[in-house]
Image: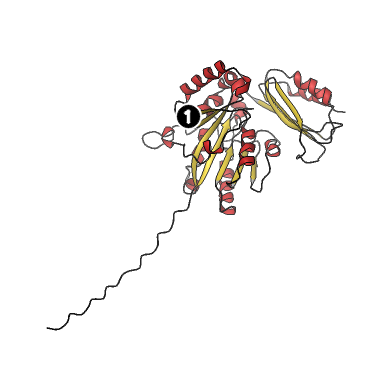
Amino acid sequence: MGKKKKETKIRQRKEPKQKAEKKLPVTIITGYLGSGKTTLVNHILTNNKKRKVAVIVNEFGEIGIDNELIVKTKEDIIELSNGCICCQVRGDIINMILKIIKTHKNLDALIIETSGLANPTPVAQTFFLKELQQLTELDAIVTLVDADHFEQNLKRSSGEDQIKAADIILLNKKDTVSEKKREHIKKQIEMLAPHARIHETIQSKIPLQLILNIGQFDVKRFVDKKGKWKEEDHGHDEFGNHIDEEGIISFMFKTEKPLDITKFQLFAQQLPDNIFRSKGIIWFKGLENKAIYQQVGRRIDVKTAEKLDKKKETHIIFIGERFDCQKLEQELKACIV
């Protein structure tokens, strides 16, 4: 009986499966005017030693102030001035994100800081558009709440929207109110956002592992049973803006002449109640470095900063409800030396 010939089995080589490209985690930082958003961004950039982070800032006003106040790193800080990130500049934001992803291959996180009047829901929706859905992954919406101005800010529709949309809430400036008041605020927040985790903070300081790369965003909260976004629009047309909608106006003051620090401090202390937020970079006569000015309600802070540029100029933005811009300008001009 002859030997059977061995059958030669031809094994097809299995091509290795291509790894799915890692999506870029995105954190949206939101909160009403003066709640501490830029301070939180600075905290992230200063203490973020292991992650490579890019930041996009959506600003309010003719000239970007926040971009000057943010800690400079080797990563891109991209600013959108005087625009709504969720409508007329949505195409711009998509192009910026695509550019960041293309230019920086090993990014660990993208931070979006919205303006203080933005509803973060349409911003979140941007990351589910076909241009970005395969490249980015919305990680969390982090909302900062100013403990000292909680009731006033909650009266604004955007203030309430920011809380409802949050995955993480930072009850910031906790040292400005009593423990009893904080507990009362937290109960109100829990009614609006029962799903959100609440952390109490001072100066927006929080361990980064509690807010970055946490996988907390749940799109199911924002879509109906058919997968359609519940909030397709947010109350103004494509070329409208949040200023008109909220009854809020802004005024930018600029000068290349120095201000008298004593006169300016008196001016700031007498600001009308309907100006609830102002900030700027000021050149005071007699000081070697320019100063950072911040005002929220009746709280005012002025401090010099060595890291600011040496240009001899001042620019301040004021945000409030139907205040007299002409009178404000006259009072500021009276502070010029």
Up/down of 23 relative to 118, above or below: below
Residue at image location 57% in from the left, 47% down from the top? 95
| Residue furthest top in the image | 180
Q: Quadrant of residue 55?
A: top right
Up/down of 192 relative to 107, above or below: above
Q: Quadrant of residue 201?
A: top right
Question: Mark 1, residues whose alpha carbon is within 10 Å: few (<14), some, or many (≥20)?
Answer: many
Residue 318 appears in view: no
Quadrant containing the C terminus in the rendered view = top right
How far from the left and from the top, in percent, is residue 111? 57, 41
How far from the left and from the top, in percent, is residue 117? 59, 29
| Residue furthest bottom in the image | 2
Pick the residue in front: 297 or 187: 187
Quadrant containing the N terminus in the rendered view = bottom left
Pick the residue in front: 99 or 207: 207
Q: Which residue is mark 1?
A: 196
Q: For the residue labelled by badge 1, is the local secondary structure a helix, a strand or a loop?
A: loop
Please say which color scheme the image uses: secondary structure
Q: Quadrant of residue 260?
A: top right
Residue 172 appears in view: yes
| Residue furthest left in the image | 1
74 on left or right of 314: left
115 on left or right of 314: left
Residue at image location 77% in from the left, 41% down from the top? 309
Tag 1: residue type?
Ala
How far from the left and from the top, in percent, is residue 335? 83, 25
26 on left or right of 46: left
How far from the left and from the top, in percent, is residue 181? 56, 16
